[in-house]
Image (spheres, rainbow, N blue to C red):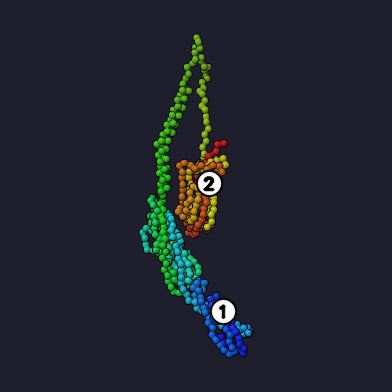
Amino acid sequence: MTVRNDSDIVEAYEFEVVGGCAPWTTVEPARLSLYPGTSEQVAVVLRPPRSPDVRAGEVPLGVRVLPAERPESVVVTETTVIVEPFAKQRARLIPKRRRAWRSARYRVEVQNDGNTPTVVTLSLPEADDHLKIAVSTAPATVDPGAKAELELRARVAKTLWFGKPAVWPVWPVRLDAVALAAEERHEHELAGELVQLPILSKWLLSLLGALLALLLAWLLLVRPAVLSAAREAADGRAQEIAQAAEPQAPAEEPGGAPDQQPAGEQGQGQGQGQGTSGGGEQSSGTVEVRTNAGQRATGTYVVPEGKVFHITDIVLANHQGDEGVLTIAFGERTITVIALETFRNQDYHWVTPIDIPENGTVTVTVDCARPGTPASGRQAPNCAQLLNVSGEMGDIAR
């Protein structure tokens, strides 16, 4: 920039940069002294950072020249600076590893670190007969400094019933990024894993084996003993009734005939003693828990006073397909901790009931990570779980 002193005195000039370029523009030297009728050049130095904060395109630049002796003679010179575009993106698959029975959801997060808008698109990997991957094919535009998320779903072709978990590679997932102003195209390859869990895990098989052993023990040992005792009691009672029904021989008095009962009267047998026995009634309770993403909520069922709840069954419902963690506790005892994304409906059963005393609690705690998508196809506003607990409700003997 050329500065000329057209006044009749020696003048000193200072410079002030204005406009969108001001944060990264300087004038060298910052101060200039000129004799009347002379001129000199100063350098306007632009150092735009390689950052999404400095958008590509035309940016106005102004330099204000401030005379020290005659400040009223200030002038401003203006021009336009063209900031060239550059493209830079970061992409990652979240999470890299999922555990599920058959299908799992992922998301691809894209960060635009360039200074021009970028259009990103997910492309399907090569066809695989064992693992199907569905992606969101609609392109998304990401502004400089902004983020975007694209959905991805992986599904195993066959259900795994027994054995060890199987690991399926979710790869390669390709992300195409096209910077609009820069006319540059970048390709990112993302990789992850889907750990397929067996429907019948080792602990469940062990539990089924234990239940089968208990059933066989009941059929072979306990049930025959109970039936035998019942038969003996029935035979003994039948014998007592038969003896009571037999006619009694009349007693003879010395030298006389036996006593005769007046006609029309019958002898009465000995009365049977009666006892009382009581049993509980089938009962059930339902706990519903709702909470927002990133929060925790708790629901509680309380056993009525004077009662004891013999619990044999619980049923869980995660109809929306929410993601997070669910914890069930009977009083201070934690029964199970289960990831929400591993089930839609789940049930547990016990041969030997678990007793919950009066005023005892069945507690359901939900840590909601991400609400799911119900049958309507729209993502739910919050997580929603249901627990139904059932068994026999009995009275406490006082």
Q: Residue furthest top?
A: 255
Q: Nearer the viewer, residue 33 or 378?
A: 33
Q: Residue at x 54, y 50 (%)?
A: 299
Residue 65: tell me if it is visible: no
Mark 1, secondary structure of its residue = strand
Q: Residues within 10 Å of mark 2 (few under 14, many from 20)?
A: few
126 left or right of 339 in image: left
Q: Which residue is mark 1?
A: 17
Give residue 79's position: percent from left, percent from top: 53, 81
Give residue 317's position: percent from left, percent from top: 48, 51
Q: Nearer the viewer, residue 28 or 354?
A: 28
Amino acid marked by disc 1? Val
Give residue 63's position: percent from left, percent from top: 56, 81
Give residue 96's position: percent from left, percent from top: 44, 60
Which quadrant of the view contains residue 122? bottom left
Q: In 3D space, how far apart are the residues under numbered discs 1 and 2 (Cα atoms)?
A: 70 Å
Q: Residue at x 40, y 47 (%)?
A: 205
Q: Nearer the viewer, residue 271 or 66?
A: 66
The disc at residue 240 is: none
Where 80 sits versus 251, above or below? below
Q: Which residue is mark 2?
A: 332
Q: Residues within 10 Å of mark 1 (few under 14, many from 20)?
A: many
Amino acid marked by disc 2? Glu
Residue 339: tell me if it is visible: yes
Which quadrant of the view contains residue 31? bottom right
Q: Residue at x 40, y 41 (%)?
A: 213
Q: Residue at x 46, y 55 (%)?
A: 341
Mark 2, secondary structure of its residue = loop
143 left or right of 132 in image: right
Mark 1 or mark 2: name the one nearer the start of the chain.
Answer: 1
Which quadrant of the view contains residue 188? bottom left
The quadrant of the rendering that contains the C terminus is top right
